[in-house]
Image: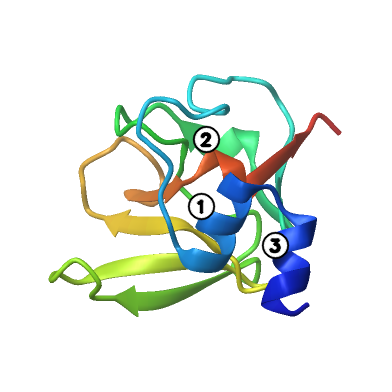
Amino acid sequence: MSEAQWREFLGAAEFAVLRQAATEPPGTNEFLGDDAVGVYHCAGCGLELFRSETKFHSGCGWPAFYAPQDSDAVVLRPDDSLGRRRTEVLCAGCGGHLGHLFDGEGFNTPTDQRFCINSVALRFSDS
């Protein structure tokens, strides 16, 4: 889709995050404290990204997952936009910005990774 088509298809907050790499405010996110069982899909293209089994409470202010549903579901890319190296997480289906990946923070998860994801970039399905 063109940027104009994305702007028409997505809401303002979704467009800002998915297409312009914005970040929603911490602690205000729809899926932050949600413990429902199901699947998180990309709000842009519907690709299955994360499953609730990999979601955990990190205290960071955004939903956190320790692994994507499939390694091919996301694309990881270096991000130096804040003057320090981070890893940006993009949807493999539409290239939309989802959030960032952080390694080695000491969370008691199988991967010791935290996929810090914006809620507005996600849609939830309980099946």
Q: How many marks?
A: 3
Please state which of residues 69 and 123 is positioned toward the viewer in this rendering: 123
The colour scheme used to paint the residues is rainbow
The residue carrying pointer 1 sits among few (fewer than 14), some (14 to 19) or many (20 or more) residues within 10 Å by Cα, namely: many
Q: Which label's residue is closer to the chain start, 2 or 3?
A: 3
Q: Position of residue 61 (x, y in %)?
A: 34, 31
Q: Amino acid at mark 3?
A: Arg
Horizontal relation, residue 43 to residue 99: left or right: right
Q: Identify the residue under disc 1.
A: 67
Q: Residues at badges 1 and 2 in contact (C-beta under 8 Å)?
A: no
Q: Residues at badges 2 and 3 in contact (C-beta under 8 Å)?
A: no
Outermost residue on the right side: it is 127
- Residue 127 can be seen, yes or no: yes
Disc 1 vs disc 3: which is toward the camera? 3
Q: Secondary structure at mark 3?
A: helix
Disc 2 vs disc 3: which is toward the camera? 3
- Residue 45 can be seen, yes or no: no
Q: Identify the residue under disc 3.
A: 7
Horizontal relation, residue 91 to residue 125: left or right: left
Please identify the quarter of the rendering in which residue 74 is found. Answer: bottom right
Spatial CA distance of label 1 from label 3 is: 29 Å
Q: Looking at the image, is 66 positioned above or below residue 75? A: above
Q: Position of residue 35 (x, y in %)?
A: 59, 20
Residue at left offset 61%, top offset 57%: 15
Please identify the quarter of the rendering in which residue 99 is found. Answer: bottom left
Q: Identify the residue under disc 2.
A: 55
Q: Which label's residue is closer to the chain start, 1 or 3?
A: 3
Residue at left offset 19%, top offset 66%: 82
Residue at left offset 45%, top offset 73%: 76
Spatial CA distance of label 2 from label 3 is: 29 Å
The residue carrying pointer 2 sits among few (fewer than 14), some (14 to 19) or many (20 or more) residues within 10 Å by Cα, namely: many
Q: Amino acid at mark 1?
A: Ala
